[in-house]
Amino acid sequence: MTTTRTPLSLAAAILAAALLAGCSSSSNDDPEAQLRLLHGAPSSPNLDVYVNSDPFALNLPYKGAVPYETVDAEGIQVRLAVAGTQTVLLDTYPVLGDDNHFTMIVINPAPTTQVLLIQTEPTDLPSGRAAVRVAHAAPGAPAVDFYITAPAAELATATPTYTNVGYRASVPAVPLVAGPYQIRVTPTGTRTPIYDSGPITLSEGQDLMPVLLDQPQGPGTLTLVVLPDSGQAFEWKDTGG
């Protein structure tokens, strides 16, 4: 049987198609952001983390991290709960910019749990370079200077790479020539390390965010948990120099 479209039915079909296309476009154009998370609250329990009721991380231990994942940029709820329970430690409602990158660091032990939200856009690196940005999330440490030097370089004549970085503070990325380094952290204005990475290597193209955390179980009293731009987090433990 042949079906003949009247002008009215044809117009209705066109309108319906346009509405469907508009709905599809709107859904695809919802603002999204990249979010990663680090459990940096010493003496706190393992965490279950939910974004809009969806699991983001389950049973996350202290110093545990989740790499970047895509989330809604607007209207989201992040819930932190004691792992395996309904005990909520914090509900927070971050506003994330469309197509931006953010790092959320859980700080302060329960019941005073808080989060730091830091915008951490990837660094545009030239050939042969790596990037390092730092954050201070160790409540047991004073304001500090970061020295990123050649291995075994004398601090007496070195210039701090970052100076007077206080608790909850972060600093932008610094591009460095890829190669061997040593990171030492001192109380601001002094040259006596309270953290020493020992020899490390920065590889070409790495974009790293070392986060200073307390180290309740040792060795030392501080550690750096390193969040790469892609891949899993790792740790530069204090070697004691």
Image (spheres, rainbow, N blue to C red):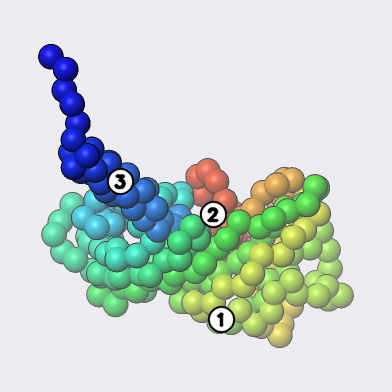
The answer to whether residue 112 of the structure is visible from this angle is yes
Task: Give the Cα distance between marks 1 and 3.
Answer: 54 Å
Task: Give the Cα distance between marks 2 and 3.
Answer: 44 Å
Q: Which residue is mark 1?
A: 166
The correct choice, above or below, for 141 with respect to 56 in the image is: below
- Identify which amino acid the numbered label 1 is placed on: Gly
Q: Nearer the viewer, residue 38 or 93?
A: 93
Measuring 28% from the left and 57% from the top, which residue is drawn there? Answer: 51
Q: Nearer the viewer, residue 200 or 51?
A: 51
Disc with the residue nearer the chain's start (1 vs 2): 1
- Identify which amino acid the numbered label 3 is placed on: Ala
Residue 106 screen position, x and y as percent: 38, 66
Bin the neighbour count of mark 2 within 10 Å (Cα to Cα): few under 14, some 14-19, many 20 and up. many
Measuring 24% from the left and 58% from the top, which residue is drawn there? Answer: 52
Asked whether, in this view, residue 95 is left or right of residue 102, the answer is left
Measuring 25% from the left and 69% from the top, which residue is drawn there? Answer: 91
Tell me the tag on residue 227. Answer: 2
Q: Secondary structure at mark 1?
A: loop
Asked whether, in this view, residue 74 is left or right of residue 52, the answer is right
Tell me the tag on residue 37. Answer: none
The correct choice, above or below, for 142 with respect to 57 in the image is: below
Tell me the tag on residue 18. Answer: 3
Disc with the residue nearer the chain's start (1 vs 3): 3
Q: Nearer the viewer, residue 197 or 38?
A: 38
Residue 240 screen position, x and y as percent: 64, 62
Q: How many marks?
A: 3
Bin the neighbour count of mark 1 within 10 Å (Cα to Cα): few under 14, some 14-19, many 20 and up. some
- Identify which amino acid the numbered label 2 is placed on: Leu
